Amino acid sequence: MNHRRLLLLSSSMVYGQDYLGHGADEILALLGHNVSHVLFVPYAKVAWDDYTQKVRTCFEKWGISITGVHEAAEPGIALENAEALFIGGGNTFLLLHDLYKNELMEPIRNRVRGGMPYIGTSAGSNVAGPTIQTTNDMPIIYPPTFSALALVSFNINPHYLEPGPSSQHMGETRMVRIREFHEHNPQPVVGIRESSMLRVDNSSIKLIGPQPAKVFRAGKKPLEISPGTALDFLEQ
Amino acid sequence: MNHRRLLLLSSSMVYGQDYLGHGADEILALLGHNVSHVLFVPYAKVAWDDYTQKVRTCFEKWGISITGVHEAAEPGIALENAEALFIGGGNTFLLLHDLYKNELMEPIRNRVRGGMPYIGTSAGSNVAGPTIQTTNDMPIIYPPTFSALALVSFNINPHYLEPGPSSQHMGETRMVRIREFHEHNPQPVVGIRESSMLRVDNSSIKLIGPQPAKVFRAGKKPLEISPGTALDFLEQ
């Protein structure tokens, strides 16, 4: 994992902003001057063409063209030739199911190891972890495994939030759910609040954006992490 | 399914009340005068003994004794002899995983078909549906399938709620998640708000409790159902 360049966003939408608006600077910084074309994976939603068109409209404003991986005759070959990859949000189970079905897991891992920039939002960030077991989504389809891309060695909980102080809801909080995860699984979990994101460069991991993140480790107290903080310790 | 007697509660806890307090009358009505002993399934949580003790303390106030299914030498034989069954809440994936592991799925189905009263709260209500695919829980363990007990022919979403009018959270609402479910699955879903429950007697299904429920069907507008309303149409 020596050439990783990842941008893992909690969400594609932030209240009051356009699609990907809050991540534009960081997306363009990740892609740099050499990338003019991005391969997009729409599997997390059902309407692949509509979803790809939405992403295309957004990226074209930045002078970057988009191909939906489903538009290619051979998804594997499209990936092999991709300058950069963007996996969009939606339902994480559906996304993982279709990544396996299209035999893209190992090819994505290989390309990311080789330095291809990877952008994920929500479900697309979730699948970058070792497993999807800290998704918020409903299990609407049965994937062959919960194991995911493992581009980073910790799990991600996107759209992380805590209940308001006046909440009378008795369903499990996000924090309780993650504690339950740690009763059965060892890896750390980073709860990324909407509008924040992780930038990964080789072995450097940094929290970017206006909101702190919350780090959960089995048997330890959760940590609040301020924007700009290095999270390299998660993989050490 | 001619002898079903089920009570499916959204939650075991309601804000400001004791454990199972809001369901006490209905639980006792379901069990009737002949049941003095209930078999409890604590699989949805990790600390089976503690969980069973909590349930025991509650039921003993009502003059009903409790055995944890894990306390029996043979879970299958305990089930065969049970007067009634209570499956408690926690993590739905963990619960389903352990029901299969202990080979209790078919025996529970058979006993419920034969008239054994069944009480479920939260995850315990979830597994009464055809699948657990409308759970709110994190997939902390990989079950052999998402197929569940199918004691009723519709799915359940416990702890159902809608976002407050001032919410700025951009993660999917419960309603959006259930719509995504219906893009891949045909059966209706009943969103049961905390404090409400379904009582099933043979072919009669009734909503009980202070809160309305929301019924979701593929391709149709969601329906708000008032307490006391018959939901038999869900299985017709």
Image: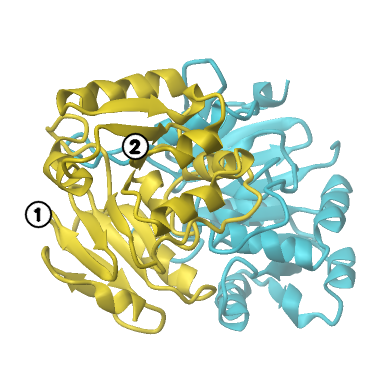
Chain colours: A yellow, B cyan
Q: Position of residue B126 (x, y in %)?
A: 61, 48
| Residue A102 in view, yes or no | yes
Residue shown at the point (65%, 69%) measured from the top left: B43
Kindly identify the amino acid type of the residue bearing the numbered disc 2.
Glu
Q: Position of residue A121 (x, y in %)?
A: 32, 44
Question: Which class describes the residues within 10 Å of circle 2: few (<14), some (14-19), or many (20+)?
Answer: few
Against B203, residue B36 (above or below) is below
Is residue A163 visible to the viewer in this orientation of the structure?
no
Q: Quadrant of residue A226?
A: bottom left
Residue B62 picture quarter: bottom right
Mark 1 crowdedness (10 Å alpha carbons): few <14, some 14-19, many ≥20? some
Split into 4 quadrants, where in the image is the C terminus of chain B? top right
The answer to whether A144 is drawn above or below residue A218 in the figure is above
How many marks the image carries: the answer is 2
The residue that mark 2 highlights is B162
Q: Amino acid at mark 1?
A: Pro
What residue is rendered at 21% in x and 35% in y?
A: A20
Q: Residue at x 77, y 66 (%)?
A: B101
Looking at the picture, tell me which residue is in the foreground, A158 or B133.
A158
Which residue is under mark 1?
A210
Left or right: B142 in relation to A138: right
Of all chains, the one bearing label 2 is B
Position of residue B134 in the picture relative to residue A85 (left or right): right
Q: Secondary structure at mark 2?
A: loop
Question: In x, y percent, where is residue A31?
Answer: 22, 44
- The answer for which chain carries disc 1 is A
Q: Using the image as rendered, state which of residue B142 and residue A106 is in the foreground.
A: A106
Q: Look at the image and tell me in which quarter the N terminus of chain B lies.
A: top right
In-image side of B52 versus A219 (left or right)? right
Disc marking residue B94: none
Q: Secondary structure at mark 1?
A: loop
Q: Are marks 2 and 1 in contact (CB under 8 Å)?
A: no
